[in-house]
Structures are given as C-alpha cells and as structure tokens.
Image (cartoon, grey):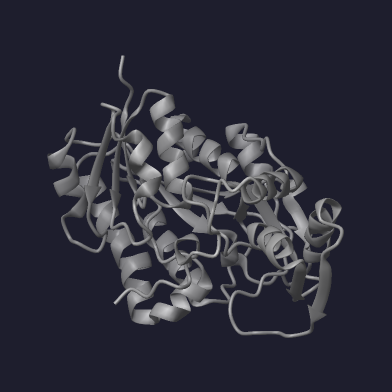
Amino acid sequence: MTGKHILITGGAGYIGSLLTSELLRANYRVTVLDSLLFGGESLLPFLHNPNFHFVKADVTEPRAIKDAARDGWQKPDSIVHLAAIVGFPACQAVGRQVAWRYNVEATEMVFEQAADLGADRFVFASTYSNYGLAADGKPVTEESPLNPQSLYAETKVAAEGYLLAQKDGVTAPISFRFATLYGISPRTRFDLIVNQFVLDAYTRRQLLIYQRGYSRSFVHVQDVVRGIIIGLEADKSKVRGQVFNLGTDDGNYTKDQIVNLVLKRMPETVVEYKDLTFGGDMRDITVSFEKIRRVLGFETTLTVDDGVREVLHALKTGLIRNPSDERYRNAQFIVQ
C-alpha cells in the first residue's frame, strides 16, 4: 500500500534531497517543488520511482503549491517547507527585500495554499540562530527569549510568528529549530562549519579559526531528516503549533573541540586563530534538546566525529570530485 503524500519545497537541497530519499524508502509518495538554484542532480536517482513527482517552480509564485498539487497527486497530506535563502551570508548577499520575500512572504503563501488544500500539517525549517547570544550562559530552551543577530534569523523569527498565529486551523504548523548541520547528502554543503573545516584541512592542510571560544550546537543531516519524519508521523496533538529544537545535547561543542576532532584524523593540519569579530550570525550558546526527546522520543544516532570521518572519506575517495564548486555553497548564489 502506498503511503501518504508529502510535498517538499526545496526538495533538491541539502536536507530535502536526503528527506526525499528516506520518505520514498518508507513508501511515501513525494512531490518535490524546487527552482533548482543549485541544480537538480540530487534528484536524478528518484526519477524512475512511481512514487516520486518533480515540479520546477519558485515558492514566491502565488499558486506554486496548488499548481504542483494539481499537476501530481492532488492534495498533499503534509508539506515540508525547506525552500529559503539559507544562512546569513546568503541573506546578506541578496539583501533584506529579497530575503524577506523568500523566507517570510513565501512561507505565508505556501502555508495559505497548504491550508486551502486541507493539508494535515506543515513542517517549517527554522534555526537555533533565532536565540542569538544567550544572556546568562544557560542552555536555551524553546521558551527562551529570541534575540536574532542576523537578517537570516530575523526572517525565521518572523515566519515562525506568522505560523504560530495559524495553529488553530485545519493545517497544523510545526517548527523545528535546527542546530548547525553537518554530514553528506545528495547535495552536500561545504559552507557549514564541520564540513568546511574537514575540506580546508584536507585540501589546504590549514584551518583559519575566527570566534575561537564560541560554543555552537551541531546535528547530522541524517538525524535532521529523521526528526522531520517523526514530526510528520507523530500524533497531531503533540506537534500542533509546537516549536522544537532539533539536535542533541551531545552536539554542543566549542570551535576548539571541533578543530580537535579534525586534527585527530588529520594531525598535520596547521591551525591559525584570528581575533576577528564580524557582523552577522553571532552565536555563542548551548542548546537544550530536552523537549524533542521528551515529547517526540527523538534521539540522534550520529556524532560530529562520525561526520568528520564521513566527509573526509568522501573527499579522499573522490566521491565528491570538485568540492570547491559553487553548487556546494549557498552564499555564492545571488537571487535577482
């Protein structure tokens, strides 16, 4: 029996391509809507699958979701909204107006179409950047005050606020505040700390570290996909209008600790530190993941060390032949 129909915006991306794979493996029907800003090679393995449907469209188009539904299996049971200008460098590059259009206004339009189609739930990709800098040094929870330090985080806070106001409708919104991702996916990114550190250490034998003592929280892309699927399958009453930090308490690291994990596998790497503070996504926080563990029973399965090993293996064996290609970075793309 074929499973429920999930529509994923941004399904060709870092998270979306892996989520598509896992949902198809679990016998869901999957429609991917993507503008293919970074190419569509990540979706090629799914084209033969009768449970897979692809629509090339931009989420800022007012009827993109409704047209995609009409083009495929009609009403989606749930929508996973991943499409966005992701990360503060990419948002800075395109400017406030474009970032707001893609990250806030498009979220509102996609949700409204989901509600009109009678979708059961709407999973929103948010970020722990929303917390900014923790004032008291204690682990931040979903109840902690939001203190966005970048345009990217501002857009995610605004979109979350809109969704929270829609929580009593037919379509149940769920927001996941992802920790910093790492690991390999069909469309890997090398503009993320762990992946970038491994790449720099392997290709240059050198690491240049800014904001040395800062603490951040990390989670493997595979565990993020597992968390999203748990959100899709959980009892609706547990997730309606809820916000969950998605990660693990074991994933809270300082940059020095991440560097040490890289040095363990590439001890010849030269490490340089620069005391440069730059405007943007300032984060020096420890994050609590008690809620997602308690409410949804979510536990991660992979560690940062696993991620370092996996990324290094992909580079050493040539599985990713040209990791410096701009398709592996979000910030180099400017949306006109």
Any part of residue 152 in sight: yes
Q: Name the quadrant of the N terminus.
A: top left
Residue 50: x and y in percent read 26, 26
Tell me: 156 left or right of 177.
Answer: left
| Residue at left offset 47%, top offset 50% | 187
Number of labels in the image equals 0
Q: Name the quadrant of the C terminus.
A: bottom left
Q: Is residue 125 above or below residue 212?
A: above
Residue 31: x and y in percent read 28, 39
Front in this rendered view, residue 154 or 39: 39
* Res. 281 image quadrant: bottom right
Tell me: 316 left or right of 79.
Answer: right
Front in this rendered view, residue 124 or 68: 68
Looking at this view, name the residue that lies furthest to the top.
1
Tell me: 70 left or right of 89.
Answer: left
Q: Is residue 232 above or below residue 246?
A: above
Residue 70: x and y in percent read 13, 41
